[in-house]
Image (cartoon, coloured by chain):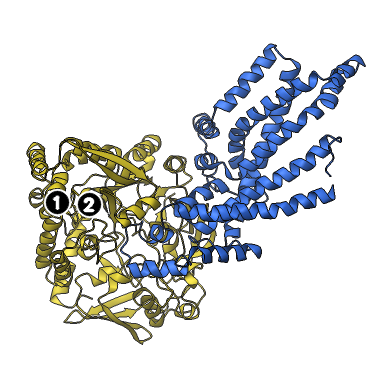
Chain colours: A yellow, B blue
């Protein structure tokens, strides 16, 4: 396991925070856990359909929720103790002194659903496909593993990963819920086979997929983990309409929707089902971002951008918007409540995050006057036509800016044209978002490095100082020093330069039937895992 | 007659080609990019190289004329291509949903015809009486009520009266008729009512016109029974415009039930259409548009043939 001092420190820190998150993150789940029971089939809702069946190439939860139960990972996040990383197909691992070599011992006796035995060759082939994809194969998270030099399989039960430079959270990155382990022979024959087919070592075998309707899995009797899974099978129902989702939960056609409900949906379900339902809540690794176009006048002037962020009453907005949307927590670049969160005392010193709104708005008006922006200045706010939470977020922003004499017009577009406009710089101010699978500055800050280095940064600025800070924190092995660099990065992005800034983070709300047991909500809707889930009588 | 049918079918080819070309150009005018929607809209970090690679794989880096040529050559071989979003053959994507949409269209048509013909005839025969007014209220209400709204009311009724919801997933009729009908009968009623309102009004006005004709007066004068006059002499001659309306509505139902499908969570062609457009899945949009255009063309040919059957005076040269 973690053998080196720096890694031990990181592990202990993560564990302590996991306990903190576990203690504070859930509601209504405090009764002593009853004994797990085998049997039954779980029906759950998925609000979108998987574009392909290949986790390596896709980026949506719509792949994770129905298909992830067919696969194992090398290591995974503990479903009950986020963000602790626990063994999955790797039964143990060691990290070299310099943090550059990770050696994994692969579990023996693990069978694929076709009956063949898993070896380190399968793990290497899968990781190679993710990190060094062959020509014509898309790996969506390839960039996340740019520190990896090589993956080798020196023996049938050993995998060695060598890094070019140490990465503080490499293990967590490896635990990505999309890093499914495939069969090497199949990948050798056709590296794109998994886009249309399913064959893993996971707790459930694939049964059927009816497009637009459902995805079904059944228990894999030869699963390597004794006594798991508890469920006989599961059925993921594809239901996109929130009203139909709520109705399906109310009438027991499904027991849960793992992504998360809006407060109104939660209340409707709770009111209808009463004590038959449990609501689990957690901070969510997703947020809404305000993206001024840094190349378009007057937003190329940092005073104007700073005025925009100063005008937003995030604390008041949090109280109001959390009643009608799943937005709520106020935070900086890292998730509030997460291991890297900025303490409130420090956060409130950033422009736009203070609690004295009168002073902030006076300052905003002064900055606008200084920048020569006239009273009633008109601009557009481009937003997606996704009702929850984008549209309420956009409406709120328009109101906030009106209070400093700006006249913002809310332009709601379909996702296609919206993305095209953001990409092309055809906007004044945009409403953007991020959603990630774990708390890590490498992942959460990637959106803020210079536009020429991050395709996800639509704010159109170049700041090499910021890029340097990103690189510095990424390679910093000491957690405290890393946190300091992250704070510096945050101050520069959100406050000093106000290139782009967060509106609010999201709050995950998962109401589910009490019959559903062995499930604990985590801060990411990508981390769902059915291995330990069971149904009571 | 056979020559006429063949000529009509041959004409279908250039019609569909023109439709196909228009669709091909139109879908590419809409802003948005399937690759970005798929890889970036989830907020993930994807390099420009990956995006470019994917664009190349889908053939979107080729010039427009080359993309068009590829598609038309495929069409000539009856190959609609593969969905850019799912990678599955377009024909398979459509076939899966067509089963539900066709069944729903047939069921809604049955509901509509069962209501429209008797009510329309009754209203015409009892013109100006309370019966006529009742039917008019019924049909105007049907025209004014969107089928999705009626669908929501039906669902609410089921919820509050029986604490029951129709199944959320589709089961084919031959697998489990009860599950199938318990899911589809409600949307069929909601859609069929609006559809029947159109057909009822058309039946009534066509009947009123025919009932004034000399041959109907002659039939009455001959002392024929009301049933024989109304059904054999009047209705048969009044059916032509009614059949036209029913046929065109049927074609519309194949792909037009977008909102109703959402309300009942139906996995039909309408929902597929919306998904394809919102994802900019060019090949699937093109395939679906061709399906709908073909449905209209085919229904029109069938209507022409039915006219000849209903009215022997009609001859196609």
Q: Is residue B172 visible?
A: no
Provide the residue designation for mark 2: A296
Residue A46 located left or right of residue B264: left
N-term mark: 1 or 2: 2
Provide the residue designation for mark 1: A301
Q: Position of residue A360 (x, y in %)?
A: 9, 41
Give me the C-alpha separation between circle 1 and circle 2: 9 Å
Q: Nearer the viewer, residue A461 or B101?
A: A461
Which chain hosts label 2?
A
Q: Position of residue B79 (x, y in %)?
A: 62, 63
Residue B194 located left or right of residue A141: right
Picture quadrant of residue A207: bottom right
Residue at x-position 22% and y-position 52%: A296
Is residue A293 depicted above or below A137 in this figure? above
Which chain hosts label 1?
A
Image quarter (top left, top right, bottom left or bottom right) of the N terminus of chain A? bottom left
Mark 2 falls on what kind of element?
loop
Same subunit, tags 1 and 2: yes
Q: Nearer the viewer, residue A259 or A430?
A: A430
Q: Position of residue A517 (x, y in %)?
A: 37, 52
Q: Residues within 10 Å of mark 1 (few under 14, many from 20)?
A: some
């Amino acid at each position: 396991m973690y053998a080196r001092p720096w890694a031990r420190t990181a592990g202990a820190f993560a564990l302590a925070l996991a306990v903190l998150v576990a203690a504070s993150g859930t509601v209504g789940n405090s009764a002593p856990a009853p004994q797990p029971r085998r049997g039954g089939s779980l029906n759950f809702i998925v609000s979108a359909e998987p574009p392909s069946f290949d986790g390596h190439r896709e980026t949506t939860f719509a792949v994770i929720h129905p298909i992830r139960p067919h696969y194992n990972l090398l290591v995974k996040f503990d479903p009950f103790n986020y963000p602790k990383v626990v063994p999955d197909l790797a039964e143990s691992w060691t990290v070299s002194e310099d943090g550059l070599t990770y050696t994994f011992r692969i579990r023996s006796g693990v069978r694929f659903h076709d009956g063949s035995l898993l070896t380190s060759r399968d793990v290497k082939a899968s990781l190679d496909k993710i990190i060094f994809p062959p020509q014509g194969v898309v790996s969506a998270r390839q960039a996340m593993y740019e520190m990896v030099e090589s993956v080798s399989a020196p023996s049938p039960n050993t995998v060695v990963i060598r890094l070019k430079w140490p990465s503080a959270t490499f293990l967590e990155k490896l635990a990505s819920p999309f890093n499914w382990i495939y069969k090497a022979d199949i990948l050798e024959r056709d590296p794109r086979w998994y886009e249309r087919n399913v064959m893993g070592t996971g707790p459930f075998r694939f049964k059927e997929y009816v497009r637009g309707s459902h995805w079904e899995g059944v228990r894999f009797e030869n699963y390597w983990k004794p006594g798991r899974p508890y469920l006989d099978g599961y059925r993921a129902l594809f239901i996109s309409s929130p009203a139909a989702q709520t109705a399906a939960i109310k009438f027991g056609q499904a027991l849960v929707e793992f992504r998360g409900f809006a407060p109104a949906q939660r209340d409707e379900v709770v009111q209808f089902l009463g004590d038959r339902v449990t609501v689990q809540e957690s901070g969510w690794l997703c947020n809404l971002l305000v993206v001024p176009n840094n190349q378009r006048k007057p937003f190329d002037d940092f005073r104007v951008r700073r005025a925009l962020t100063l005008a937003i009453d995030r604390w008041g907005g949090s109280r109001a918007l959390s009643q009608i949307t799943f937005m709520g927590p106020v935070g900086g670049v890292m998730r509030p409540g997460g291991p890297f969160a900025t303490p409130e005392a420090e956060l409130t010193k950033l422009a736009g995050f203070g609690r004295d709104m009168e002073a902030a708005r006076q300052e905003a008006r002064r900055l606008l006057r200084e920048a020569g922006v006239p009273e009633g200045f008109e601009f557009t706010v481009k937003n997606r036509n996704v009702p929850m939470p984008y549209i309420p977020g956009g409406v709120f922003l328009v109101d906030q800016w009106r209070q400093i004499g700006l006249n913002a017009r809310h332009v709601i577009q379909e996702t296609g044209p919206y993305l095209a406009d953001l990409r092309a710089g055809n906007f004044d101010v945009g409403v953007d978002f991020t959603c990630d699978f774990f708390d890590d500055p490498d992942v959460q800050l990637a959106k803020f490095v210079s536009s020429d280095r991050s395709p996800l940064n639509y704010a159109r600025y170049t700041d090499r100082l910021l890029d340097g800070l990103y690189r510095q924190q990424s390679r910093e092995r000491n957690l405290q020093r890393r946190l300091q660099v992250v704070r510096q990065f945050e101050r520069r992005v959100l406050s000093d330069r106000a290139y782009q800034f967060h509106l609010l983070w999201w709050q995950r709300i998962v109401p589910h039937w009490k019959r559903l047991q062995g499930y604990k909500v985590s801060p990411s809707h990508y981390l769902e895992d059915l291995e330990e889930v069971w149904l009571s009588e | 007659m056979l020559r006429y049918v063949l000529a009509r079918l041959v004409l279908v080819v250039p019609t569909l080609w023109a439709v196909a070309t228009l669709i091909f150009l139109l879908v590419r005018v809409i802003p948005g990019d399937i690759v970005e929607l798929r890889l970036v809209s989830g907020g993930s970090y994807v390099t420009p190289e990956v995006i470019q690679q994917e664009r190349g794989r889908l053939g979107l880096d080729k010039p427009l004329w080359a993309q068009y040529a590829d598609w038309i050559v495929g069409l000539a071989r009856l190959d609609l291509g593969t969905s850019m979003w799912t990678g599955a053959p377009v024909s398979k994507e459509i076939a899966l949903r067509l089963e539900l949409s066709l069944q729903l269209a047939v069921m809604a048509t049955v509901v509509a015809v069962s209501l429209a013909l008797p009510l329309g005839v009754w209203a015409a025969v009892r013109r100006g009486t309370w019966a006529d007014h009742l039917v008019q209220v019924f049909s105007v209400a049907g025209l004014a009520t969107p089928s999705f709204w009626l669908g929501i009311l039906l669902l609410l009724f089921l919820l509050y009266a029986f604490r029951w919801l129709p199944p959320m997933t589709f089961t084919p009729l031959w697998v489990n008729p009860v599950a199938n009908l318990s899911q589809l009968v409600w949307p069929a009623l909601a859609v069929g009512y609006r559809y029947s309102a159109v057909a009822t009004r058309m039946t009534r006005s066509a009947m009123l016109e025919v009932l004034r004709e000399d041959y109907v007066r002659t039939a009455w004068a001959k002392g024929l029974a009301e049933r024989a006059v109304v059904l054999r002499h009047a209705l048969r001659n009044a059916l032509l415009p009614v059949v036209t309306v029913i046929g065109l509505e049927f074609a519309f139902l194949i792909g037009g039930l977008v909102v109703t499908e959402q309300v009942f969570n139906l996995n039909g062609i309408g929902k597929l259409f919306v998904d394809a457009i919102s994802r900019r899945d060019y090949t699937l949009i093109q395939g679906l548009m061709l399906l709908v255009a073909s449905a209209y063309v085919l229904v029109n040919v069938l209507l022409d043939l039915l006219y000849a059957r209903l009215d022997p005076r009609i001859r196609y040269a």
